[in-house]
Amino acid sequence: MVERRRNRTAVVMGMTVIAAAATAGLSGCSSDEGAHDRAQLSSVEAKAATAQANEKAAADFVRGDQHLNNVQGPARMAEFDALTARTCPGSAANKRLAKVKADGKVDRFGYLPNKQTEIVGASTEADPNNVLVVVRYHDPSVAQQQKPQAFALRVAVGTIGGAACINDVTRV
């Protein structure tokens, strides 16, 4: 008996949904709803494109930062300057890199020509301007490093002149 009542209720609910859909279709949902839907879709696509561009900018910055250990001398300073140019003017990352250069610490970075770095992934967080980048590295020439090591960085991305720039980088 209870089973029959449930089945009957389900049939009635299904018919109600179909009737409501038919009524909405016959009453002619206005075309401005379609425009609204297209605008929402466009907004979602724009957010996705921004997130993808931010992920690429963050991954490229971290890749460049990690590559500084593979070069030395004038080539290292040129790469360091290129890395600094990717930061937003006046940002925490820009100030930190300027201080490192002013203190003469760029040439003190370890030179690890065999270090292999891989960006495992970059993912936008809830705030599309924050990107989590996971890095794995391995230097077979270092005896203590038998296995690849990994760490994560949170990269805050901004824009200047429509192009992505790096505001800050923090280890997670």
Image (spheres, grey):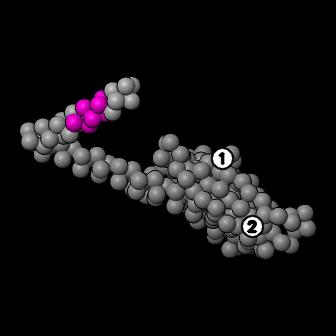
Query: Which type of secondary structure does the marked residue at label 1 adopt?
Result: strand
For the magenta stretch, what is the residue range? 8-15
Left or right: where 36 falls relative to 138: left
Disc number for residue 170: 1
- State the image quarter where residue 33 is shown: top left
Which residue matches tag 2? Answer: 69
Q: Position of residue 20 (x, y in %)?
A: 18, 35
Given the image, on which type of amino acid does mark 2 rest? Asn
Is 11 magenta? The answer is yes
Residue, far left: 27
Identified at 78% across, 59% down, the residue is: 149
Identified at 57% across, 56% down, the residue is: 122
Left or right: where 41 falls relative to 86: left
Q: Earlier in the sequence, mark 1 or mark 2?
A: 2
Instruction: Establish if 71 lies above or below 11.
Output: below
Instruction: Establish if 94 lies above or below 143.
Output: above
Is 73 magenta? The answer is no
Identified at 39% across, 50% down, the residue is: 47
Q: Quadrant of the C terminus?
A: top right
Q: Position of residue 28 (x, y in %)?
A: 9, 42
Q: Nearer the viewer, residue 39 or 106?
A: 39
Q: Position of residue 120 (x, y in %)?
A: 64, 61
